[in-house]
Amino acid sequence: MGKVVASGKKWKILVTPREACELLGTLPSGLRKRLELFPTFGRVSDGNKLAMLLRDKDAVVLDLEHVTPEVFKGCHNLKIISRFGEGCDMIDISAAKNIGIRVARTRGVGAKAVARHALSLIMAMMHNTRENDRNMKRGVWVRKPNMSESASTLAVLGFGSIGREVAELAYGFGFKVIVYSRRDHTDKRFVFVKDINKAVNMADVISLHLPLTAETKNLVSRRLLKQCKGKFIVNTARGALIDECALLDALNKDIIKGYATDVFLAEPVTGVSEKIARHPKVLCSPHVAAFDKATAVNMTRRAVENALHCLKNMHDKVVSYV
């Protein structure tokens, strides 16, 4: 059970994602008048500062801050953490539940946007888009053949809302689609397998759409990367799904054909993450897959509504609790 709040109160909500802060003006006036919104215009990386900002807040619309039990110690009014996104791997969920703080996510809001971004990375690699552009700018005319979608197999690892969208888009482009999922599915357009090794072995391109958990961390290991010899890998999920040290080694040894990513272990990139971002065989973007304007507007509204619904004890309207 979460903490109970009296009705009729004007709630204080901290908002940290820059995109959400910049779009608070798009919220319906009827929603805004019930709230006091405190934007930070960017992620609060310092745990002590985050704890201080949350001390008198009823809720927070959160970016990807690391929320530890220490952060919760002074947050006596906090009832809900409303994620601006789907992943909650940076939040100590057990610690939150132990003191009655609910955690919600904007499930499904960014699925189509992330899927489109994943497909754009896949297509750019298969069609040598970056290489062709660089050659042309250098005055070099080299006509390297593209890979054919109709002759290629895409392995979608994970079949949540984003993985499903990626599979459907890829199918529309003509790919043969293999889906790695532990659940049973009946969609006859795709081949479903429950063995990740089988999915990888059958594919030309591998696209990651799994949540980050203790089980999936470094799932793409040095061993699995060896199975990806001559293949493309795309990651629009979480950087920690891949062992980045092993990945950098695989790139340097030409084991994999290319890597495209929107996510890194360290964001902004430092250390190994920065070496991967700068690698000539890597196509990357700064964790922006979900942030087209329309999606950001919808995600901002959903995150704030999730917080408000929880505070008003209208829990059936929250989409969705973790």
Image (cartoon, rainbow, N blue to C red):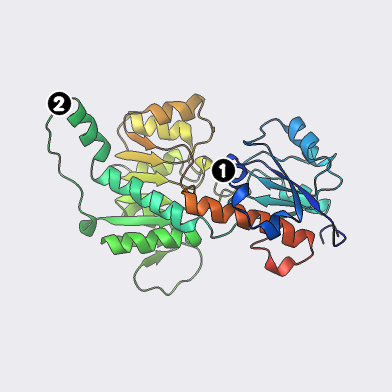
Please provide percent x and percent y for residue 303.
64, 54
Mark 1 secondary-structure assignment: helix
Q: Residue at x 47, y 34 (%)?
A: 244
Judging depth in this view, the residue of 10 and 53 nearest the camera is: 10
Q: Examine the rendering and report whether any part of residue 105 can be seen.
A: no
Q: Which is nearer the N-term, disc 1 or disc 2? A: 1
Q: Position of residue 162 (x, y in %)?
A: 47, 58
What residue did someone put label 1 on?
19
Hey, which quadrant is residue 164 in on the image? bottom left
Q: Label 2: which residue?
A: 139
Classify the position of the N terminus by image quarter. bottom right
Report the front residue among 99 and 46.
Answer: 46
* Viewer-nearest residue: 135 or 278: 135
Compared across the picture, whether 104 is left or right of 227 comes to right
Callout 2 amino acid: Gly
For the point 40% across and 37% down, the residue is 284
Image quarter for residue 317? bottom right
Q: Relative to 54, does residue 115 appear above or below in the rendering?
A: below
Q: Is residue 156 above or below residue 50?
A: below
- Foreground disc of the pair 1, 2: 1
Q: Is residue 225 visible?
A: yes
Quarter that holds the C terminus: bottom right
In this rendering, the count of numbered labels is 2
Residue depicted at x 23% and y 45%: 127
Residue in front for this viewpoint, 51 or 269: 51
- Residue 165 at x, y percent in the picture: 42, 61
Label 2 Cα neighbours within 10 Å, binned few <14 / some 14-19 / many ≥20: few
- In the image, what residue type sits under mark 1? Glu
Q: Residues within 10 Å of mark 1 (few under 14, many from 20)?
A: many
Rendering coords of residue 155 (x, y %): 36, 56
